[in-house]
Image: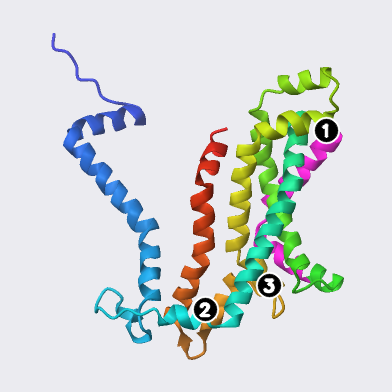
Amino acid sequence: MSASLAVPTTPAERATGFFEFLGVAGRRMLLILAVLAIVCIFIGPVAILIVTSLRPPYGVYYIWRGSEFTIDNFIEVIGQPAIIHSMWNSFVLSTIATVVSLGVTVTSGYMLSRFTGPIQRTWFGVIYVFRTVPYISWVLPLYLVTTSLGIYDSYLGLLLPHVAVHVCFFSWIMKGFFDSINPSMEHAALIDGCTRWGAFRRVALPSALPGIAALAILSWLWTWNEFLFALILTAQRTPVITVTMAQFVSETGTEWNLMSATAVLAMLPALIVTIFGQKYVIRGLRM
């Protein structure tokens, strides 16, 4: 009696058989192709942006041809006070929003992780509902609220929606960080005479520092790169860099070289924050 050939039936078995069929050389080639695809998707647009920022105005449409490069675009952009002012506004807004958001988010996540009751369930329901609402539907109500309160086109008017978004999203993540921390040390601190606030400050908070650092970096980057709220809730007094870049689009065309140079300058603070905070983000996401 001849042995019957087993036919793979599940997706996992079919995938395993496919990789065995490719062999070592085939799997290596597949990995190389996957890496190249990822590089083209993520690094390709950044490379085009950088090359465009170094091209003269007449060379932006054939960036891969010719050898004419210049730094005049950066000199012209840096010489515009509106660009420097908007970058400073973005930096101040991102920093303040991050500090205020963490002050609320850390305590909110700790409450959701360590306590149960009607207050906690209500708060969890509130942030859950706000997370399900698309951001674009917030724009008109926020515009009406900031206008009626007299805080339109101000730091406060732009700060409040950013903090609201951070609290609604990062409270869940912070709850997960505190859930991963064994509460036995806090119980021991309570037995030794610490108050609940003292146990939080001396035990839980130091243990959650990697997660807090990761959230701080993500919060800062999100606020720095945000466009929708800034477009609707700002005008002339508090412009931010993401909106100011739109000034290079006019009825006569788009100044791609100057817009690209501004985008490269706007990337630098975010790149610096990412490089120095990468280890904290990785450590925090492993908690």
Q: Tell me the residue that label 3 is attached to.
A: 232
Other-residue count near label 2 (Cα within 10 Å), few / some / many at <14 / 14–19 / ≥20: some
- Mark 3 or mark 2: name the one nearer the start of the chain: 2
Against 245, residue 272 (above or below) is above
Q: Which residues are magenta?
A: 118-143
Q: In this rendering, does residue 116 appear at all?
A: no
Q: Nearer the viewer, residue 148 or 63?
A: 63
Q: Tell me the residue that label 2 is attached to.
A: 78
Q: Residue 84: x and y, percent?
A: 59, 75
Q: Nearer the viewer, residue 135 or 268?
A: 268
Q: In this rendering, does residue 119 appear at all?
A: yes
Asked where in the image residue 19 lies, by quadrant, the reply is top left
Asked where in the image residue 121 lies, by quadrant, the reply is top right
Q: How many marks?
A: 3
- Indicate the quadrant containing the C terminus: top left, top right, bottom left or bottom right: top right
Q: Nearer the viewer, mark 3 or mark 2?
A: 2
Q: Tell me the residue that label 1 is attached to.
A: 197
